[in-house]
Image (tube, rainbow, N blue to C red):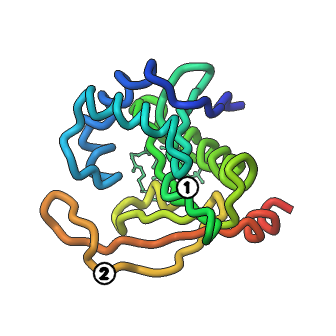
Amino acid sequence: MLDVALAPLGPWHAEATLRWLQDPVVAENIGLRSTASLERTQDFIARAAEDPTIAARAILEGGVHVGNVVLDHIDRHASKARLHVYVGEATARGRGVGKRAVALALDLAFGEVGVDKVWLTVHAGNANAKAVYLAAGFVVEGVHRAEFVLRGDRIDEIYMGVLRTDLARARA
Ligand SMILES: CC(C)(COP(=O)(O)OP(=O)(O)OC[C@H]1O[C@@H](n2cnc3c(N)ncnc32)[C@H](O)[C@@H]1OP(=O)(O)O)[C@@H](O)C(=O)NCCC(=O)NCCS
C-alpha cells in the first residue's frame, strides 16, 4: 500500500523543487518557460503561501518529499482552479505516486479550496500524465492545436477538466 500524503509547500522544500525543475523530464513536460534558480523557487514558495489564488503542496511518500502539486489560477467567481503535478524524484515515478497525488489534489480542490472545477493542460505526447488524469476522473474537453512547444516542435496541447459532480459520480 502506497503511503502518499500532501503537505503545505514550505521554504525547506525549495532545494529539491529546484533540482526537479532543472530536470529536463520535469521542465519540458510542465512547459517551464524560465530558467529555474534557487531565488525564483524560494520566491514562488513564499508567494504561494500568501496568495489566495495558489495552493501549493509537497507530495510526500513515506514522509519523503518526492514531488509537488500546485493549484493555481484559483478563480472564486468561476469556482475553478488549474492543476499542475510533477513527481520530481525519478525513482518515485511509475509506481502510482502520481495517481494518488492527483486524487489527493482533487480532494484538496473540492474540499479545503472549495472550487467546483479543476482544469489542466497536458501536451499530446505525455501519455503517462494523460493516463493519470483520466484515471483521476478528468475528461478531455478540447485540443489546442500546436500550442505546446517541446524541444522546438509545436505539438497539440490537450485541455482536460473534472467537475465536482463528475468525481462524486466516479467515486460512488
Ligand atoms: C506524470 C506524472 C505526474 C505521473 O506520475 P507517476 O507517479 O509517474 O504515475 P503513476 O505511476 O501514478 O501512473 C502512471 C500511469 O500511467 C500509465 N502509463 C505509463 N506510461 C504510459 C504510456 N506510455 N502510455 C500510457 N500509459 C502509461 C501507467 O500504466 C500507470 O497507469 P496504471 O496505474 O493504470 O497502470 C510523473 O510521471 C511526472 O511527474 N512526470 C514528469 C512531469 C510531468 O509530466 N508532469 C505532468 C505535466 S502535465
Q: Is residue 53 above or below residue 93?
A: below
Residue found 52% across the figure and 70% down from its top: 160
- Residue 149 placement, left or right of 10: left
Residue found 62% across the figure and 69% down from its top: 77
Q: Is residue 87 above or below residue 66?
A: below
Label 1 vs label 2: CA separation?
Answer: 22 Å
Quadrant position of residue 137: bottom right
Of the residues shown, which amino acid type is indicated by label 2?
A: Arg
Q: Judge by depth and name the residue closer to the eye, 25 or 40.
A: 40
Q: Which residue is mark 2?
A: 145
Q: Quadrant of the N terminus?
A: top right
Task: Give the farthest residue toward the left.
Answer: 152
Counting from the top left corner in percent of width and height, residue 134 is at: 59, 64
Q: Quadrant of the C terminus?
A: bottom right
Q: Judge by depth and name the residue closer to the eye, 167 or 57.
A: 57
Q: Which residue is mark 1?
A: 132
Of the residues shown, which amino acid type is indicated by label 1?
A: Val
Secondary structure found at label 1: helix
Mark toward the start of the polypeptide (1 vs 2): 1
Q: Judge by depth and name the residue closer to the eye, 99 or 105.
A: 105
Residue found 38% across the figure and 25% down from its top: 14
Mark seen at residue 60: none
Badge 1 residue CB within 8 Å of ligand 1: yes
